[in-house]
Image: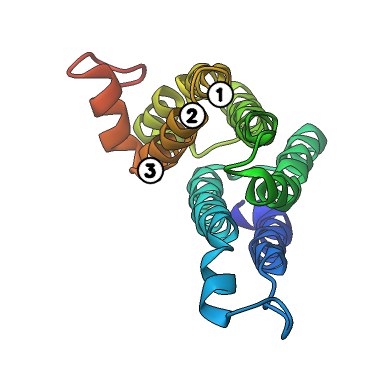
Amino acid sequence: MQNETARIEAFSDGIFTIAATLLVLNLQAPTLNSGKLSSSLLSQWPHYFAFAVSFVFIGIMWMNHHRLFSLIRKSENTLVILNLLLLLGVTFVPFPTAVLANYLGKPEQRTAAALFNGTFFAIAILFNLLWRYSATHQLHDLDRNEAAAHISAQYAVGPALYLICFVLTWVSVAASLVMNILLAFYFAIPPYHASRLTHGRRRLPNE
């Protein structure tokens, strides 16, 4: 049963690896005629920031994908399609990262931040679609319903919070990016602890 998803996981791991690797292409070595080396390096701080943040984000998305497929045991066509859509979002991440790096601190930074935050809003929806489908169609390990319930509780708040983050772009670019980073670390928390943090002592489904 476990081998049904093995090829999905292997392919997905490769995509996550490539997406994370492509981020480094946004870092360019200063040329000889670009002035003092130290100044040229420091002037690229938006690129370093965008690279570090997006690398961490992709790593956290990989962690979450791994958590899902530690529970998902069955594969079918719709699940494969939803997983491919999620991977499409993951492979798109280097593009808004490059745009954000180029425009951060400049007049058009709001548009760049909106693209960046909007990308992760879309990815949050795709993560939910993948998980909700597998849970609804009982493709996960039914002996681990409590763990599945904690994932459902953690993911339930994702799209709404990322939408707030996206809207916040028009209020404060810096605040929207800080919120995006905080959300990433929230989803890095194991689902059991995250659902307790979100729902307190309220009983979750299947508990």
- Image quadrant where residue 88 sits: top right
**Between disc 1 and disc 3, whose residue precedes?**
1
Q: Considering only vertical position in the picture, is 190 above or below 205?
A: below
Please name the residue that numbered disc 3 is placed on: 185
- Tell me which corner region of the image, top left, top right, bottom left or bottom right, holds residue 26: bottom right
Mark carried by residue 169: 1
Nearest to the observer: residue 198 or residue 38:
38
Q: Mark 2: give few (<14), some (14-19) or many (20+) Cα within 10 Å.
A: many
Q: Residues within 10 Å of mark 1 (few under 14, many from 20)?
A: many
Helix, strand or loop at label 3? It is: helix
Quick check: marks 2 and 1 in contact, CB under 8 Å?
yes
* Three-letter code for the amino acid on which mark 2 is drawn: Ser
- Kind of residue indicated by mark 3: Phe
Separation of marks 2 and 1 at Cα, in angstroms: 5 Å
Per the image, the residue denoted by label 2 is 176
Asked if labels 3 and 1 touch by Cβ distance under 8 angstroms, the answer is: no
From this view, report whether residue 86 is shown above or below residue 91: above
Which is more toward the observer, 199 or 24? Answer: 24
- In the rendering, at what x and y percent does residue 119 appear? 67, 34
> Measured along the vertical axis of the image, is residue 102 above or below residue 146?
below
Q: Residues within 10 Å of mark 3 (few under 14, many from 20)?
A: few
Front position among marks 3 and 2:
2
Circle 1: residue type: Thr
What residue do we see at 55% from left, 58% from top? 55
Query: Where on the picture, by quarter, is residue 33?
Result: bottom right
